[in-house]
Image (cartoon, helix red, strand yellow):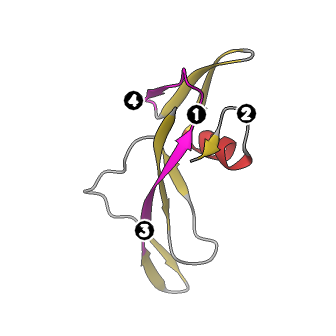
Amino acid sequence: MKITMYHRTFPVKDAPVAVSLVPYAASQKHTYTANGKIYDAVLKEIQVVVPDDAKLDVMKNLLCWAGEKGPMKSTAREVYDFATAGTSGFKLA
């Protein structure tokens, strides 16, 4: 099954990166200051393949699914890391 994740970073070296399972609020403006210059966030949507039985808990921003060792819950960062590493059941689409 595919889900959409939301990726936020800034166009400068070593800037922080954030990922979310729910969209960022359109009313929020995110900025980052480096070397005396202010950068606006760059937002993009990423399609990620996750296990077929996965469910989103949007209130807690978690992905829940049945793993080999029972029920699993992962944060958006963990899901993104699983997908980029190609962990079983996860990949970037």
Q: Note whether 4 is above or below 67 in the view shown.
A: below
- What is the spatial separation of the Cα atoms under label 1 and label 2, in whole angstroms? 9 Å
Is label 3 in contact with label 4 (beta carbons under 8 Å)? no
Q: Mark 1 or 4 closer to N-term?
A: 1
**Residue placed at 47% from the left, 38% from the top?**
3
| The residue stretch that appears in magenta | 40-60
What percent of the width, then of the height, locates residue 83?
65, 44
Instruction: Give the left or right position of residue 51, taking residue 8 as reference.
Output: right
- What is the spatial separation of the Cα atoms under label 3 and label 4, in whole angstroms? 24 Å
Give SS at disc 1: loop
- What is the spatial separation of the Cα atoms under label 4 and label 2, in whole angstroms? 26 Å
Amino acid type at image mark 4: Met
Q: Mark 4 or 2 closer to N-term?
A: 4
- In front of the other: label 4 or label 2? 2
Q: Which of the numbered marks, if any, corresponds to residue 88?
A: 2
**Residue placed at 43% from the left, 80% from the top?**
38
Disc 4 marks which residue? 59
Disc 1 marks which residue? 50
Amino acid type at image mark 2: Ser
Amino acid type at image mark 3: Ala
